[in-house]
Image: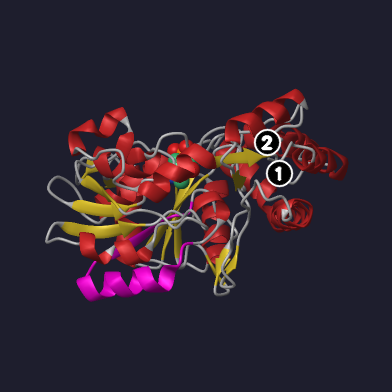
């Protein structure tokens, strides 16, 4: 089977270095909040152009702690996209605030800035755009709206480590940004991990406190916080992976170009569109087709894995019944949910395997 992502091949490629590092980690006796986390935080701050980075337990916590540190909670509203992984809106709800959805653009799949301003009320505190599938959101428009209304902008950059917008890395495009290190992410570990980056010293300091039980001084607690730290073990793996990151993202971009060249002329498929402002990192490569079910079935026949990201937009999720959205509220998100499917995309996809994927799509019967 040709897989969507090849985390096995990815971590195999790091194995000799990881085994060596693991021995050193065992011998260090320091497994929580040690030097590796600090070095990784510094490296990621530098890489994203932010002044501070704070490691946490996962990407969802990165969002929850950031919202918490901004004082966002019950009675507040946060504008976000209905077309994303559930965790984006879940984090807002976990804080007791309400996600308010704005429909997405049909070609980039990202939040459509032109729908945002009309949704702002006296309760709105933040805008939470998602750089979906590794493609940056059109941030200038969102930042302008946020500035005009005194809102903060929190980037959900969980799928977009290494992507740039107008030459600037994601992570430096809003007031704070959240990353996930779930294994299949562009920068991933062998478990869960997350990071918040920001250039706001007060926000960074508050998140540092929150992640460690609301404590700055051992056994003294200023407030109710979280146990949400990034382990030394994961920092070790991420530091090792980070050295390959640029090569891996370059490889994803090269594979994307081959997909564009091989699939562009197929009239039953729509390929993702990128603005000139973006240099995306192709976390996923998603195509749209009216005949998705048949295409996916024919790829399965050819031993090629596909994935549906995402079959149900968030406003139609059972968990959000209480928000009283209905079918038809966000037609673009709903159409994408019925049309999009991901094909294999990862830095360890071999050219011969990619050729098989392209050939299978080229041979799909066109009506
Ligand atoms: C867009 C988005 N937001 C948030 C998350 C949550 O990250 P995690 O799984 O590390 O909690 C993910 C990934 O799973 C994601 O893709």
Q: Is residue 313 above or below residue 142?
A: above
Please report the residue visible at 60 percent of the width from the left and 55 percent of the height from the top: 272
Q: How far separated are the C-alphas under marks 2 and 1?
A: 7 Å
Residue 120 lies within the magenta run: no
Quarter of the picture containing the C terminus is: top right
| Residue range corresponding to the magenta coloring | 137-157
Residue matched to label 2: 4
Q: Quadrant of residue 229?
A: top left
Residue 346 numbered mark, or none = 1
Residue 147 numbered mark, or none = none
Residue 152 lies within the magenta run: yes
Q: Quadrant of residue 58?
A: top left
Please report the residue visible at 66 percent of the width from the left and 26 percent of the height from the top: 297
> CB atoms at circles 2 and 1 under 8 Å apart?
yes
**Whole-percent x, y for residue 144 in the image:** 32, 75
- Left/right of residue 76 with respect to residue 189 in the rendered view: left
């Amino acid at each position: 089977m040709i897989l969507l992502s090849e985390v096995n091949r990815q971590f195999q490629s790091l194995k000799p270095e990881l085994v060596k590092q693991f021995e050193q980690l065992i011998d260090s006796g320091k497994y929580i909040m040690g030097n590796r986390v600090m070095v990784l935080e510094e490296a990621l701050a530098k890489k994203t152009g932010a002044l501070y980075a704070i490691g946490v337990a996962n990407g969802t916590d990165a969002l929850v702690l950031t919202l918490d540190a901004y004082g966002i909670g019950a009675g507040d509203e946060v504008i976000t996209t209905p077309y994303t992984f559930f965790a984006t809106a879940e984090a807002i709800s976990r804080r007791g605030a309400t996600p308010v959805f704005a429909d997405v653009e049909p070609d980039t799949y990202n939040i459509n800035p032109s729908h945002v301003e009309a949704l702002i009320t006296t309760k709105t505190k933040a805008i939470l755009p998602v750089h979906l599938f590794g493609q940056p959101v059109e941030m200038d428009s969102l930042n302008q709206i946020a500035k005009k209304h005194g809102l903060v902008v929190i980037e959900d950059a969980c799928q977009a480590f290494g992507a740039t917008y107008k030459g600037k890395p994601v992570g430096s495009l809003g007031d704070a940004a959240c990353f996930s290190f779930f294994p299949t992410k562009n920068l991933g570990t062998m478990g869960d991990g997350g990071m918040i980056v920001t250039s706001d010293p007060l926000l960074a300091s508050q998140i540092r406190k929150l992640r460690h039980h609301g404590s700055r001084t051992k056994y003294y607690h200023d407030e109710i916080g979280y146990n949400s730290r990034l382990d030394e073990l994961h920092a070790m793996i991420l530091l090792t992976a980070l050295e390959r990151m640029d090569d891996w993202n370059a490889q994803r971009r090269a594979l994307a170009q081959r997909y564009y060249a091989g699939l562009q002329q197929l009239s039953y498929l729509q390929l993702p569109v990128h603005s000139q402002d973006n240099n995306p990192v192709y976390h996923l490569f998603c195509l749209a087709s009216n005949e998705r079910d048949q295409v996916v079935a024919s790829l399965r026949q050819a031993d090629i894995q596909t994935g549906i990201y995402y079959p149900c937009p968030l406003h139609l999720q059972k968990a959000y019944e209480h928000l009283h959205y209905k079918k038809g509220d966000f037609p673009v998100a709903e159409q994408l949910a019925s049309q999009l499917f991901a094909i294999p995309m990862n830095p360890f996809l071999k050219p011969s395997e990619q050729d098989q994927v392209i050939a299978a799509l080229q041979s799909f019967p066109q009506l």
